[in-house]
Image (tube, helix red, strand yellow):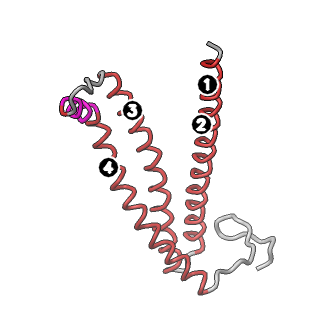
Amino acid sequence: MDTNETTAHGAPETGLAVTFEGQTYLREAGKWAGFLGIIGFILCGLLLIVALFVGTIFSALGQLIPGSGEMPPAAGIAMAIVLILIDLLYFFFALYLYQFSARIKKGIVFTDQFQVTLALGKLKSFFKLAGIVTIVVLCLYVLEIVVVTLVGVASLHH
């Protein structure tokens, strides 16, 4: 096929072929991605349970530890919201890995280029999300350093 021709799915054909060894690597990566995706879903469920009961857990711990006082209800709600947001974010990591796994295995077994392309799209989405989360966390670290430095300098002048 000429490099300017298009496939049945409308994408230009580049002539790139995956060797048997490459297919073996993709198949194995798909198995591990499926495992990590399923473990991710399980951990999401556990984190959701913890988030729903975090207020109760901290209240019980407050009663068990003498002198610790009780946690205000608003703190439990805030913590639950933060944990649910983290859980939602983690869910998408697990989902992209699982979708990559399912599609790459199907694409390799049935030599379906379209499924392999969809799988690689999910892998791209996984890494894009990881990159965005990394940038946000690094920005929060920088912000934290700036705030701590400003508070430190301000406390020296008082």
- Indicate which disc residue 81 carries: 3
Q: Residues within 10 Å of mark 3 (few under 14, many from 20)?
A: some
Of residues 75 and 33, the one nearer the viewer is: 75
Residue in the picture at 68% in, 80% down? 17
Label 1–label 2 contact, CB within 8 A: no
* Pair 2/4: label in front: 2
Residue topped by disc 1: 152
Which callout, 1 or 2, points at the residue further toward the start of the chain?
2
- Residue shown at 44% from the left, 38% from the top: 85
> Picture coordinates of residue 68 (x, y %)?
27, 27
Amino acid at pointer 4: Gly
Give the x, y percent position of residue 5.
77, 71
**Residue 34: within the magenta?**
no
Which residue carries the number 4 mark?
Answer: 45
Decide whether residue 56 is among the magenta residues. yes
Q: Report the span colored magenta.
A: 55-63
Q: Are marks 3 and 4 in contact (CB under 8 Å)?
A: no
The secondary structure that dominates the magenta segment is helix
Residue at 48 percent across and 74 percent down: it is 105
Q: Quadrant location of the C terminus? A: top right
Q: Nearer the viewer, mark 1 or mark 2?
A: 1
Q: Is residue 96 left or right of residue 76?
A: right
The image shows residue 38, relative to residue 85, as above or below, that is: below
Q: Earlier in the sequence, mark 3 or mark 1?
A: 3
Q: Residue at x 32, y 28 (%)?
A: 76
